[in-house]
Amino acid sequence: MKKKLICAALASAFILTGCGTSGESASGEPILTSKEQGSSETDTSTTDAINVGVNTEAPKIEGYELLWHDEFDGTTLDDTIWTREERQPGWTNNELQEYTKSDENIFLRDGSLVLKAIKDESDGKKKYSSGKIRSQGKEDFLYGKVVTRAKVPEGQGLWPAIWMMPTNEDLYGQWPKCGEIDIMEVLGSAPETAYGTLHYGAPHGEQQGTVTLTDGTFASDFHEYSVEWEPGEIRWYIDGTLYHTANDWFSGEEGGDEKPYPAPFNQKFFVQMNLAVGGTWPGSPDETTDFSKAEFEIDYVRVYQKPEYDTNVTKPKKVFRAATEDGNLIYNGDFAEQEDLTDDNNWKFLLFEGGEGAAEIKDNTMIIRSEKAGKVDYSVQLVQPDLPMVKGKKYRVTFDARADEERDIVVCISAPTAGWVRYLKDTRITIPAETTKFTFEFEMKDKDDNNGRLEFNLGNKGSTATVYISNVRVEEITDAAE
């Protein structure tokens, strides 16, 4: 039986609010229909009280109908859409700010919403306040396209975000089992990079895409961030360019059965936006952080829906990459072939958080030259993803390495789509000036993962000495436990 989610069309603005039909709530909640169950797929037009007050018309998108939007063209925040959220410092992620309802932290200016972080040292102690708003209980929806345009602030410790959470967080269990869709996050200390992330599951699963600008930053100008959320797939875009797709999430109790796919992303979600200060990811502000410019500006939020969605979806089966003929799970481990080190095939060279450098393959060797070590281990990083990691199996990692002068690096096998756990723990090693072979062994104790990732992390270790890596192997050394 093929089931479809039929989404109600927008009704005339002249229909009286409060007069509902059996098709849709005032917030535009879609309708699940099934002909076999005798429900109708005909009249689904009902009222949708789209943003009262001043509100510029939103553009049409082919194949979609406008569900709700806010262009922030008025003088005060539209409280029929948004709720100002109040939270004490440390509420989550060890963040430093207090979220307030104050017009100093949340206000409209020149056609944009401004969420402003404020530093207060009036009593001799550093205190921070900021703004956070959410549409929960007012404009919740199931499936759609969310389009936003925003300009982020620059500064150490600033953390702007546009994200979505489920209306009923208890339906599948507390975070991360409930699910979370991060439309956009940027660290003020590295405003050239934007992140789109999906959180779910138990154990915690995570899938993340990134976009790094080569010209300017996301703090230099406004950019458009959007997500297309469908029953079996979620897609992330920046300025209309697709950069990340997810379709193989899960939910359930750790050690127990998974909930039927596509849980947890088959329930109503809402949009929220905030400017955090500090926290476990961005770190605390420092003397370089200019709070006179600590403003997160949002030009608009627009939510569209297709007239119908096919809910008859199946979770894709995991595909495990085969080893090479000699049993190596690493492709091009001997560096016999040249590669584009910026794409997602085989080796990839990455820079984050102040790291600067370059990598090249020459004479069967990966040569990594650092110019600035950056603030974190992964500021200068060489990785290879898609490693098949099977629970119960044992693996051996080997490689040869030397450096222009003795220096430290960190090696690990991580899980970028499984909460960044470490299958091979972060291991700090000293690379000498003469070529040395390194060997590590570990047992895979977590659930099967087709996306393990070998990492060489050269950041934040007090040295920028050039490193030479060759003969990289990851191989299975035992069969899976019976």
Image (cartoon, rainbow, N blue to C red):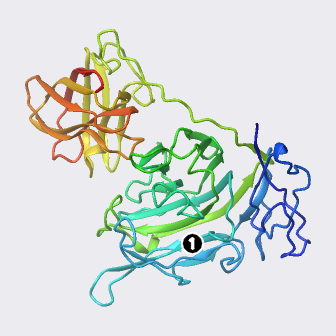
> Which three-letter amino acid code belongs to the residue tagged 1?
Ile
- Residue 86 in percent (x, y) is at 49, 79
396 horizontally vs 293: left or right:
left
389 horizontally vs 306: left or right:
left
Which quadrant of the figure has residue 167?
bottom right
In this view, which residue lies farthest toward the bottom? 123
146 horizontally vs 297: left or right:
right
Q: Name the one closer to the observer, 64 or 143.
A: 143
94 horizontally vs 146: left or right:
left
Instruction: Identify the residue position indicated by label 1 in the image.
Output: 133
Q: Residue at x 62, y 58 (%)?
A: 149
- Residue 238 in percent (x, y) is at 58, 47
Q: Residue at x 29, y 68 (%)?
A: 286
Q: Residues within 10 Å of mark 1 (few under 14, many from 20)?
A: many
Q: Report the quarter where the N terminus lies.
A: top right
Q: Name the one closer to the observer, 239 or 440.
A: 440
Query: Is 176 located above or below residue 102 in the figure?
Result: above
Query: Is 425 located above or below residue 50 in the figure?
Result: above
Q: Name the one closer to the observer, 101 or 252.
A: 252
- Residue 285 in percent (x, y) is at 32, 68
Q: Report the quarter where the C terminus lies.
A: top left
Q: Is residue 187 visible?
A: yes
Q: Residue at x 7, y 24 (%)?
A: 434
Which quadrant of the figure has residue 424?
top left
- Residue 461 in percent (x, y) is at 17, 46
Query: Is 37 located above or below residue 301 in the figure?
Result: above
Q: Is residue 212 visible?
A: no
